[in-house]
Image (cartoon, rainbow, N blue to C red):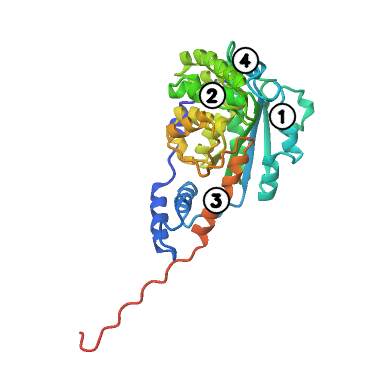
Amino acid sequence: MSRIDLDDFTDLIERPDGGVRRDAETRRERQIVPPGALGRLDELGEWLTAAQSAVPVRTVERPRLILFAGDHGIAELDVSTRPAGGARELVRDVLEGASPAAVLARRLQVPVRVVDMALDCDPGDLPEDVGRHRVRRGSGRIDIEDALTAEEADAALRAGIAVADEEADSGTDLVVLGDISVGGTTAAAVLIAALCGTDASVVTGRGGVAIDDLTWMRKCAAIRDALRRARPVLGDQAQLLATVGGADLAAMTGFLLQCAVRKLPVILDGVVSAACALVAQRVAFRAPDWWLAAHDSGEPGQAKALDRMALEPLLQQGVKVGEGAGALLALPLVQAAAALGAEMPEREPEAEKEPEAGEA
C-alpha cells in the first residue's frame, strides 16, 4: 500500500457553505429576539448552520465523545505526576464510568468511544473494540528517538481517517474530541513550539495534574531537546508526527482532517487536540473552519495554538483534567445555539398600513 499523501487534503476540504451562513443571518434578523442579544450563541448557531448546510439549523441529536489513547516514552523522564505507561488506568476509569469525562458524558447522554493507538499494556487488558486500531505499544522517547517509524505514522493517520469515516457513516452529527495519555502534553508542546517558532519555555505547561517546579524544569528540558529534533522536518507533517508526535497524536490529526472532508463538526478539548489541529491546519488551511475550541485550559501551548488558528475558546473554566471533560462542558452551549436557531419563531410581518380618508 502506498503512503498517504497529506497534500490531497488541501483539495478535498472545502469551507462551510458561506451562502447558507448568509441565509442563516438573514433568518436570524427576522426572529423575535434581536440579533446580538444572544451573544456568541448567534455566532455558534450560524457556524453550525453553515457546517450542516441547512437553514434552519438542525438540532444536535447525536454527538459523540471520541478519545484517542496512548502512552509516550518521554514520560520516563518524570515530566508528569502520573507514572510512565499509566494511561491504561485512565482508560479503565473512563470505560468504568468513574472519570470526570465519563460522569459528564453520562449526564449529557453522550456515548463515549475510546481508541487505543499506543497504550503501553497488553492488548488483551482492554475490550477488543478499544484496541482494534492500535499501531504499537507506547510511542518512542522523542528527546532521543523518533516517536514512530514512517510506516507506523502512516498507519496511525489512516486509523484516524477510518474512525472519522466510521463516525460520519454512523450518523454522528457532532464530535467532542479529547485524548487519554501520559506524556501527551509534552509531545503536544513540542509540536506547537515547532510550528509556531517559539522556545520550549513558552509552551511548557503544568499538565492535567499540576506539576511542581522541578518537574516543570524537566519537562521544559525534554521539550527543548525534542524541539531540536523537530525543526529539521517541519516541512513534512507526517514526518513531524513520526519524529516528535506519537500514534495517538497522528491518529487525531488524521481524524480531524477527515472530519473536515466529511463535513463533520468537531469540538476541540485541550492542548493535545489543539496541537493536532495545528498540524492539520498546516496540511489544509481550510480545515479549522470545521472546529470549535471548547475552553481555555490554562496550558500556554494551547493558547498559542488556538491563537495561530484564530479559534476563540467558548469557556474560561481552567479545566485541565483532559479526556474531553472541558469540551463536554461546551457541548450544551452548542446544543443551545442549535435549538434556538431551529425553534425560535420569527416575527410576524408588519401589516400594510391602511390608507387614511382622503388618500388616493
Q: In the structure shown, which secondary structural element does the residue marked by tag 1 occupy? A: helix
Task: Out of 327 and 161, give the one closest to the viewer.
Answer: 327
Task: Give neighbour class at mark 1: few <14, some 14-19, many 20+ (Cα, 10 Å).
Answer: many
Earlier in the chain: of badge 3 and badge 4, it is 4
The residue that label 3 is drawn on is 333
State which mark lies toward you, 4 or 2: 2
Task: Return the disc, 3 or 2, that comes first in the chain's sequence.
Answer: 2
Question: Looking at the rendered structure, which numbered label has been put on residue 141?
Answer: 4
Task: Evaluate if marks 3 and 2 touch, with contact meaning CB atoms under 8 Å apart.
Answer: no
- 349 to the left or right of 153: left
**Residue 182: image x %, image y %?**
66, 25
Structural distance between the alpha carbons of marks 4 and 2: 17 Å
Residue 50 screen position, x and y as percent: 45, 48
Q: Earlier in the sequence, mark 4 or mark 2?
A: 4
Residue hosting label 2 = 204
Q: What residue is pinned by disc 1?
A: 131
Spatial CA span between label 3 and label 1: 32 Å
Of the residues shown, which amino acid type is indicated by label 4? Arg
The crowd level at tag 3 (other Cα within 10 Å; few <14, some 14-19, many 20+) is: some
Query: Residue 142 appears in which quarter of the rendering?
Result: top right
Q: Nearer the viewer, mark 3 or mark 1?
A: 3
Indicate the amino acid at tag 1.
Answer: Gly
Q: How far is disc 4 from disc 1 in space, using C-alphas? A: 22 Å
Mark nearest the camera among 2 and 1 is: 2
Marks 2/1 in contact by CB < 8 Å: the verdict is: no
Secondary structure beneath dot 2 equals: loop
Q: Does 59 sit left or right of 131 as displayed?
A: left
